[in-house]
């Protein structure tokens, strides 16, 4: 296995809850399920599988990395910064947790290889991320090996369940935020829309339908002729196959790959 760089100064992590080799096996099984669901949906290529590794130790991530996987998602700023410092540089990091606007710069600066923040839910956060990308141009150009500062991909998080405990804009407000990102945030690239779903973190068909309708409205408002140019991020461990069959381009799967979680970095933020 590829050696992991020293995790000096990082918070202690618990040992893996599943035996060595099982994480890679679970990943392979999940990728196969993604491919089968994508085939049933007549997709030209499989949906993207984001391995959600929150609270899991680096050796488990490295099992996935050594198996060829590169798309990883994290929920906490502290944790993604710590892991990005010790994981290989070609990991494609995606942030999928709530971001307080005052943590935007810490996130962008601490993870130079950050490709997407899926949870933008306010103009204030969009503006802070936009400014952070500009401020961290040198680090990002080095991480991506580019001569120009790469734009940071963002998704508008939509609250499709109506739950007050969930972050995200109301479906009717998604266009306004998307338009602001598209027109006023030159260092960001609007990649699509994201939703979490129901209180138990599963989704129902109406959640998926609500996000698809929201995308249609955003595309119409932005003059995007082909809705598939904006991705849908919906579906987690309990429902990702159904999500793909209903049009998801990006699924976020954690426990099916890494096992049950121990929350150690943070408690769930209050709304």
Image (cartoon, rainbow, N blue to C red):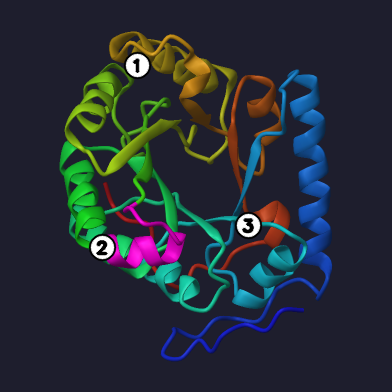
How far from the left and from the top, in percent, is residue 39? 80, 25
The local crowd at label 3, few if under 14, some if 14 to 19, many if 20 or more residues have their Cα within 10 Å, is: some
| Residue 136: assigned label | 2
How far, Cα to Cα, is label 2 from label 3?
23 Å
Image quarter where the N terminus lies is bottom right
> Which residue has dot 1 on it?
218
Q: Earlier in the sequence, mark 2 or mark 3?
A: 3
Q: Earlier in the sequence, mark 1 or mark 3?
A: 3
How far from the left and from the top, in percent, is residue 175? 28, 19
202 horizontally vs 224: left or right: right
Magenta span = 136-149
Between disc 2 and disc 3, the foreground one is 2
The local crowd at label 2, few if under 14, some if 14 to 19, many if 20 or more residues have their Cα within 10 Å, is: some
Q: Residue at x 40, y 51 (%)?
A: 97
Mark 2 in CB contact with mark 1 (< 8 angstroms): no
Q: Residue at x 17, y 44 (%)?
A: 127
Q: Give yes or no for residue 138 being in the magenta stretch.
A: yes
| Residue 105: assigned label | none
Residue 106 occupies quadrant: bottom left
Q: Earlier in the sequence, mark 2 or mark 1?
A: 2
How far, Cα to Cα, is label 1 from label 3?
29 Å
| Residue 70: assigned label | 3
């Amino acid at each position: 296995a590829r050696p992991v760089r020293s995790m000096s100064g990082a918070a202690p992590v618990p040992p893996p809850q599943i035996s060595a080799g099982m994480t890679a096996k679970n990943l392979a099984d999940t990728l196969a399920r993604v491919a089968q669901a994508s085939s049933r949906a007549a997709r030209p290529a499989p949906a993207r599988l984001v391995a959600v590794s929150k609270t899991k130790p680096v050796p488990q991530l490295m099992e996935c990395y050594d198996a060829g996987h590169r798309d990883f998602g994290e929920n906490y700023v502290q944790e993604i910064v710590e892991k990005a410092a010790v994981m290989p540089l070609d990991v494609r990091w995606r942030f999928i947790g709530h971001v307080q606007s005052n943590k935007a710069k810490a996130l962008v600066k601490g993870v130079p290889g950050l490709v997407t923040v899926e949870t933008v839910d306010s103009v204030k956060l969009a503006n802070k991320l936009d400014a952070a990308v500009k401020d961290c141009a040198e680090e990002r150009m080095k991480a991506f090996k580019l001569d120009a500062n790469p734009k940071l991909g963002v998704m508008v998080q939509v609250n499709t369940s109506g739950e007050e405990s969930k972050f995200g804009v109301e479906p009717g407000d998604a266009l306004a935020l998307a338009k602001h990102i598209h027109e006023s945030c030159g260092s960001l690239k609007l990649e699509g829309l994201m939703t979490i779903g129901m209180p138990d973190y599963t989704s129902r068909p109406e959640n998926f339908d609500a996000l698809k309708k929201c995308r249609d409205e955003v595309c119409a408002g932005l003059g995007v002729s082909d809705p598939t140019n904006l991705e849908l991020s919906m579906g987690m461990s309990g429902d990702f196959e159904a999500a793909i069959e209903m049009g998801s381009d990006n699924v976020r799967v954690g426990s099916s790959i890494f096992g049950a979680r121990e929350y150690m970095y943070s408690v769930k933020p209050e709304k």
